[in-house]
Image: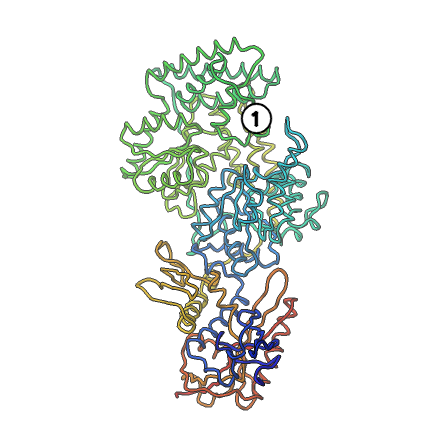
């Protein structure tokens, strides 16, 4: 059969496109061929009888022409558009978030640190980076490493804001091979850090533990790794577990994104260790910090410069007031209980120092905080302690001290009450007396602080003339939460609770109840992590953590982007106590100093774990030695002030990055891609099969392979849960872009008329697809060409015609064959254009035509 020859192009009726013969074979009188099928970029085997000469091919119909032109325009736009994620994410990003994305993706690979102030949405920025890299086929496997208390928030926000489903993985009991099976994973940072030693463990057991956790994760082949609270990876030296984990993660992915509002913390050596994860050559532990070295890697926005999409400042003003609680004669027993517990704490803490029993010291610290919270909290803990001292409660071995600071408050109480002393008879008697006093307090009347709380709430209702005003109340302790729930409910308030024992679904339901029907939410620290409660603007700290950074985290639940009211914060303290004096100085004097340096909260300067210990030491010293409280405060403030100056000096060099304006954002968001994607999908369905129906709000699609999608829209649908955004990131749409059939000048080509073109415009319009194969991905480009009948090339007209064809604003009037001279010229021009692209891409090129049209202007 002369038609079938090696290297020849034929029309395949089976694949409905031109195919190239690779070789042939005669078997029992039947000619079998191996073909190259360009649209699938694959070799197929078929009967030669299924092929015919190209001049017998049917001419393209209009829908097929539109589909190929639209696919090319999308490819061209993807190659030339700086950012895609803002176009195809359910969330509308803010100017500083788009600016962060633009700077991060300006370098390939993406390896940078997002250092925005707390509350500016680093999670959204990270999600945009994920989306951008996925849209550009640069990342498929993504790992997010976050503190334990934030992992569920990450899962929720990735799903809500980006429709990205992440799996929360607990390595304990997990098959190490699971890491290779999950493309989107989230894990706690401490769950995968390697061990160097553990009491009672053999080297073999430690090795197996690390193999199952640390090595299993770092050897799973990630494309992008994101680390939240990344400053924790700096460690105190290169040997600590978290920095070892950081180095392992940094080597495990091409793209690395670190998130931290406090990357420097006044420690240059730790800062350099952190930066070395991004680039170990530029940043060496004993090196110098250079502004020019830092700027490409660190992206930071301050609250004072951040604006919304309307150009207005993002954050509302905040007012903070101290609410002093007095113990009058009616509450004399409660005052005695406070004094008695404080004396017990002084005695017990001094004994712990003498005997070097850390857990006794921890217990005393907790007792002081408990008695400041509520009578019920101190009573329940005294009961637990007495049961241990009397031997009626089982003991369990204490955890390591390193684990203490990562425990939730309830865990700390359960651990500390079991602490042993060399002689506990005196303590047993003291605890019995205090427990009896606490029970008498509860039986006498409500806590003075609870009564003052209700007065405050009624007062705020009246001032705002709103009987349904919402209040967010924070406490450190679950017994206090339970007491307040009972107390407020009996006084007519509708209450919902949040604490660390609730799973993510329970937390969501509680948040929804507070948003709709409940007037009051009472939350513990663990329960409040990750909440977005900007529909409430009054936060009440019923008890105050000794670490002011925890207070800031509480307030951040309502002082968020989207808050429409001035935020009111009330801090409740007992009048005349040491805690009142310390808080008064910390929350006023120190914040004034920090504000003068450009920081508006402690968390912008201090690391949470170290600060926790520092603040605790400050309070306990003031309680043990109240006469020298001012000395302890002055020393502490001087140290924080010096650290703040160092942090400011480092960060000041990073704040001259350009911030996009509202107009810039609109330019990014105004794109032809949604319309082009709609033209591509609808035309491809009409031309190549599948079912498509249009409803009132969206399309229902049944793809040729049977895959069904409903409620499809091509522009972001807002918050409508029944609509689903279809973008170029969808695998089915991506396949339409990569599988465009080959076009041959030897097959009949459509003659088209475009009414808006002058009648004398005639010639050959063609579209060429360039594929550059490199590492790690293949890049696609589209090149249009228009050669008029006189042989002149018009590249600008070629693009104008392209836009018109992709919109379908043309008619087909017949079919013809391509002029060989015009074809040769268009092929040579496309090849010449592709040379520059190949040079920039540094890969292996392949170029072939996907569409030929004979152009005629004027009306047909």
As rendered, which of 638 and 299 lies closer to the eye? Answer: 299
| Residue 90 vertical position relative to residue 197 in the rendered view, above or below | below
Residue underneath mark 1: 399
Residue 370, image x, y percentages = 45, 23
Q: In this view, does 236 lie above or below 565?
A: above
Comparing 27 with 195, the one in front is 27
What residue is drawn where x is 57% and y is 58%?
A: 138
* Residue 532, quarter of picture: top left
Q: Can residue 606 be seen in the rendering of this structure?
A: no
Asked if residue 814 is positioned above or below residue 67 in the image, the reply reads below
Q: Would residue 237 appear left or right of 824 to someone viewing this image?
A: right
Q: Which residue lies furthest to the front in this view?
A: 28
**Mark 1: few, some, or many residues within 10 Å (few <14, many ≥20)?**
few
Locate the C terminus and report the quarter of the image it occupies.
Answer: bottom left
Residue 304 is left or right of residue 204, and the answer is left
Residue 460 shown left or right of residue 188 in the figure: left
What is the x, y in percent for residue 738?
52, 68
Question: Can you give x and y, in whole percent of width and height, for residue 611 in the image?
Answer: 56, 32
Q: Where is residue 472 in the image (x, y as percent from the top left)?
A: 37, 36
Q: Give left or right: position of 181 versus 267.
A: left
Q: Residue at x 71, y 46 (%)?
A: 284
Q: Which of 814 and 339 is in front in this view?
A: 814
Number of labelled discs?
1
Which quadrant holds residue 309?
A: bottom left
Kind of element beneath mark 1? loop
């Amino acid at each position: 059969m002369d038609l079938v020859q090696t290297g020849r192009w034929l029309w395949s009726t089976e694949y409905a496109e031109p195919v190239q013969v690779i070789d042939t074979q005669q078997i029992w009188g039947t000619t079998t061929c191996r073909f190259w099928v360009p649209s699938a970029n694959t070799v197929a085997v078929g009967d030669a009888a299924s092929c015919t000469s190209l001049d017998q091919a049917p001419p393209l119909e209009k829908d097929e022409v539109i589909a190929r032109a639209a696919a090319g325009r999308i490819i061209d736009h993807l190659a030339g558009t700086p950012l895609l994620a803002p176009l195809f994410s359910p969330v509308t990003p803010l100017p500083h978030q788009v600016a962060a994305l633009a700077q991060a993706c300006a370098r390939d690979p993406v390896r940078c640190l997002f250092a925005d102030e707390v509350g500016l949405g680093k999670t959204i920025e990270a999600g945009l980076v994920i989306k951008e890299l996925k849209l550009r086929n640069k990342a498929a496997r993504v790992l997010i490493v976050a503190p334990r208390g934030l992992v569920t928030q990450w899962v929720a926000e990735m799903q809500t804001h980006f429709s990205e489903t992440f799996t929360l993985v607990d390595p304990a009991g997990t098959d190490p091979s699971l890491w290779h099976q999950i493309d989107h994973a989230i894990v706690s940072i401490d769950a995968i850090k390697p061990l160097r030693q553990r009491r009672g463990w053999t080297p073999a057991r430690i090795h197996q533990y690390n193999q199952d956790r640390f090595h299993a994760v770092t050897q799973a082949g990630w494309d992008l790794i994101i680390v939240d609270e990344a400053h924790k990876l700096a460690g105190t030296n290169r040997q600590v577990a978290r920095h070892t984990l950081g180095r392992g993660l940094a080597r495990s992915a091409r793209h690395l994104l670190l998130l931290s509002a406090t990357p420097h913390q006044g420690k240059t050596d730790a800062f350099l260790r952190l930066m070395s994860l991004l680039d170990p050559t530029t940043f060496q532990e004993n090196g110098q910090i250079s502004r020019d070295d830092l700027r490409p890697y660190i992206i930071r926005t301050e609250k004072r410069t951040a604006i919304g999409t309307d150009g207005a400042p993002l954050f509302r003003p905040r007012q903070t007031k101290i609410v002093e609680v007095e113990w009058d004669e009616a509450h004399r027993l409660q005052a005695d209980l406070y004094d008695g517990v404080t004396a017990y704490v002084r005695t017990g803490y001094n004994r712990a120092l003498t005997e070097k029993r850390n857990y006794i010291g921890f217990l005393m610290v907790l007792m002081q905080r408990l008695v400041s919270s509520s009578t019920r909290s101190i009573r329940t803990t005294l009961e637990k302690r007495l049961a241990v001292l009397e031997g009626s409660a089982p003991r369990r071995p204490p955890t390591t001290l390193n684990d203490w600071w990562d425990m939730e408050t309830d865990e700390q109480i359960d651990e500390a009450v079991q602490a042993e002393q060399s002689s506990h008879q005196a303590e047993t008697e003291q605890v019995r007396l205090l427990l009896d006093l606490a029970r008498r307090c509860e039986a006498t009347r409500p806590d003075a602080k609870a009564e003052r709380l209700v007065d405050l709430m009624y007062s705020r209702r009246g001032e705002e003339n709103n009987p349904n005003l919402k209040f967010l109340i924070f406490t450190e302790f679950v017994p206090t939460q339970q007491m307040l729930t009972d107390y407020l409910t009996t006084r007519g308030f509708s209450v919902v609770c949040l604490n660390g024992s609730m799973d993510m679904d329970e937390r969501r339901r509680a948040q929804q109840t507070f948003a709709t029907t409940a007037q009051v939410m009472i939350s513990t620290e663990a329960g409040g992590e990750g909440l977005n409660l900007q529909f409430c603007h009054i936060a009440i700290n019923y008890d105050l953590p000794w670490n002011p950074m925890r207070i800031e985290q509480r307030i951040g639940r309502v002082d968020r982007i989207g808050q429409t009211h001035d935020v009111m914060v009330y801090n409740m303290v007992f009048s005349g106590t040491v805690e009142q004096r310390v808080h008064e100085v910390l929350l006023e004097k120190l914040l004034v100093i920090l504000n003068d340096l450009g920081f508006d909260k402690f968390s912008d300067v201090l690391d949470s774990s170290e600060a926790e210990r520092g603040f605790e030491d400050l309070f306990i010293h003031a309680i043990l030695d109240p006469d020298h409280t001012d000395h302890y405060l002055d020393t502490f403030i001087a140290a924080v002030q010096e650290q703040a100056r160092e942090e400011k000096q480092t960060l000041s060099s990073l704040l001259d990055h350009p911030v996009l304006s509202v107009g810039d954002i609109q330019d990014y968001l105004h794109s032809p891609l949604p319309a082009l994607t709609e033209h591509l999908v609808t035309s491809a369905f009409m031309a190549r099969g599948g079912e498509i129906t249009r409803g009132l709000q969206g399309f229902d699609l049944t793809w040729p392979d049977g895959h069904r999608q409903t409620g499809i829209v091509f522009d972001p649908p807002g918050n409508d849960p029944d609509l689903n955004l279809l973008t170029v990131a969808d695998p089915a749409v991506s396949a339409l872009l990569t599988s465009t059939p080959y076009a041959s000048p030897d097959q009949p080509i459509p003659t088209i008329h475009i009414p808006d073109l002058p009648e004398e415009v005639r010639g050959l319009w063609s579209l060429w697809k360039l594929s550059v194969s490199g590492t790690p991905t293949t890049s696609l480009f589209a090149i249009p060409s228009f050669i008029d009948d006189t042989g002149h090339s018009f590249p600008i007209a070629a693009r104008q015609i392209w836009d018109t064809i992709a919109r379908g604003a043309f008619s087909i009037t017949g079919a013809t064959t391509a002029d060989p001279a015009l074809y040769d010229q268009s092929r040579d021009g496309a090849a010449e254009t592709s040379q520059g692209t190949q040079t920039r891409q540094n890969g292996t090129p392949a170029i072939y035509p996907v569409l030929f049209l004979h152009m005629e202007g004027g009306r047909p």
